Structure formats: C-alpha cells, structure tokens
Amino acid sequence: MEQMMGDMDIAFPHLGLYLQNVPKTIMVGNFGIAIYGILVASAMLIGISISAHVGKKTGQDPDLYWDSFVWIVISAIAGARIYYVIFMWEFYKDNLLQIFNLRAGGLAIYGGIFLCVVTIFIYCRKKKVSAPLYLDTIVFGLLIGQVIGRWGNFFNREVFGEYTDSLLAMRLPVAMVRASDISESIAAHMTEGTNYIQVHPTFLYEGLWNLMICLLLLLYMRKKKFDGELFLIYLAAYGIGRAAIEYILTDQLYLPGTKIPVSMVVGLVLAVCSTAVVIIGRMRKKEIKEIKTV
C-alpha cells in the first residue's frame, strides 16, 4: 500500500482496496452537488417507497405514507438539527446564525427520530389510523434509509472511529478530514512519511448492524403480538449497536459538564425501556388470550 495518498483517495489496506479520486461533490456545469445530500435525499425517498410498499402488502393504503412524506422529511431534519444544537450550545450561543447553516453539518439521528415519532402520532390522529401500526410499517424503510444515508459519511470523510489495525481499517488523507476529528490516539499512530490516518469505518459498522436488524425484523414480523412491537425492537436493537459504536467514535456530543457521549446514554436507555415495553406487551397479550380461552 502506498505511504503517501492522494488527497481524494480512500483505502482499506487489509482488504487490498485503494479507491482513487473519491469525490465529495458532483459537478453539474459550474454547480456542485454534495454526494452526502444526494444520498440523504435518496435514503428518504427510498425509505418512504419501501414503507408504502409494506403498507400495501399489509392491507393499508399506501397513500397514507406518501402523504406524510413532506412532514416526515421536515421533522427528521428539524429534529436532528435541534438535538445537535442543544448539545453544542456552547458553540452556537455566540454564533446564532450558524444554527441555520446546514451545509456545515451538524445533524444527530436521535433528534430526527424523536421528532418524527411525535409528528407521526399527530398525523395518525388526524387521519384516524393507528400510529403504532404506522411505526411498524415504516421501520423497514427507516433502516434501509439509515444504511444508505451512512454512506454519505464515507464520502464526506467524517463520523469515523478511533485508530485501528483491524481487517476493516480505513485510511483517510489528513487534508480531507476535520482537525477536531483527529484524536490523540489517531495522531499518535501516524507515522513519519505518511499523510493519512487509519481509523474504524463506523459508517460501515452501523450500516451492517442496521441490515442485520432489518433481516431479523423481517423474520420476526409474523410473530409480533401487538402494533408497535417491531418499532420498539428496532429502538432496542439500534440503541445497543449505536451505544457500542459511540464508544469508538471521535465526533461525539457529550452530556453537559461530562465526557459521557449523549448517544451512548440515549441508546442504552432506549434499549432497556423498549425491551421492557415489548416484554410487558407480549405478556398482556398472552393473558388476554388465556382469559378468552377460559
């Protein structure tokens, strides 16, 4: 593997992969379109398409999901941004206009999920349909959308983990990453005569984890006992995976006054609470069934 990398290159040395000239933007004439934005937009569109398809297959009106698309997108972006700004307030309090500068980055997925859930309950109440069933239906599109969206981090050279020499280790040229994302551990493993860092490809870890959750939910789908169960299992499984990944991330949001990653705490709390609700919900369904058979 080359010791000096081109500024636009990305490598996976132990897999023998060396990708040259990986772009961050696509030029249309004189106008540059960020690949990150293209992937996020694609993720949302594909996600809602899958949701509408699942809805149709389960006897629901697919238009219910298409009609909510705009509200879901607005809620996802607004929630993700508000969540990020809250935990980065020390920076934004003196730079209020930067709150609206989405091109500079700063979206947190949990904020998007939380506000989307609130919006969905309001939307479903207005449409007089079951919000828990709606959440179960969109969970597959949500997971696939997350997988696609995470590749935006790959093209942006961001949201990576600490130094690693594992099989999936990824090399990124220093010139293409934010200085604040290079931890002391990463810097300590940079050798003289090289211009890259070697890190955990956390975008790939999360993508593979989400694919596994999606497959497991597809297998479990026929065994669910109550509406909302699939979404709760998603929250629990994603929370566990995200908490583990958060442990090695360099770009983190912390609880005020601590060095405790917010997403790690949120993930573990969601995992415990969602699991408890699933267990209680299944027990109640079993009790009701037993009473009816008496």
Image: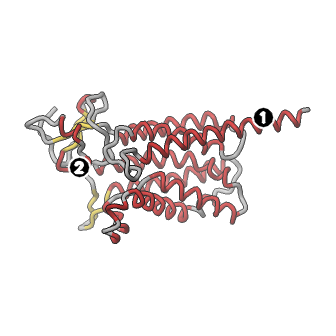
Closer to the camera in the image, 252 or 55: 252
Coordinates of residue 158 in the picture (x, y in percent): 30, 48
Instruction: Determine whether label 1 and label 2 are within 8 Å by CB.
Output: no
Q: Residues within 10 Å of mark 2 (few under 14, many from 20)?
A: some
Closer to the camera in the image, 160 or 283: 283
Coordinates of residue 202 in the picture (x, y in percent): 36, 40
Q: Quadrant of residue 12?
A: top left
Closer to the camera in the image, 183 or 102: 183
Quadrant where the C terminus sits is top right
Q: Amino acid at mark 1?
A: Lys
Secondary structure under the numbered disc 1 in the rendered image = helix
Q: Quadrant of residue 206?
A: top left
Q: Residues within 10 Å of mark 1 (few under 14, many from 20)?
A: few
**Is any atom of residue 55 visible in this view?**
yes
Secondary structure under the numbered disc 2 in the rendered image = loop
Q: Residue at x 28, y 58 (%)?
A: 26
Q: Quadrant of residue 82?
A: bottom left
Coordinates of residue 64 in the picture (x, y in percent): 64, 60
Q: From the viewer's perspective, tell me whether residue 26 is left or right of residue 136.
A: left
Q: Residue at x 62, y 51 (%)?
A: 135
Q: Earlier in the sequence, mark 1 or mark 2?
A: 2
Quadrant where the N terminus sits is top left
How far apart are labels 1 and 2 at the CA level?
53 Å
Picture disc at residue 177: 2
Q: Is residue 28 above or below residue 193?
A: below
Closer to the camera in the image, 107 or 260: 260
Q: From the viewer's perspective, tell me whether residue 230 is left or right of residue 47.
A: right
State the residue position of label 1.
286
Coordinates of residue 22 in the picture (x, y in percent): 24, 48
Q: Residue furthest bottom?
A: 97
Q: Amino acid at mark 2?
A: Val
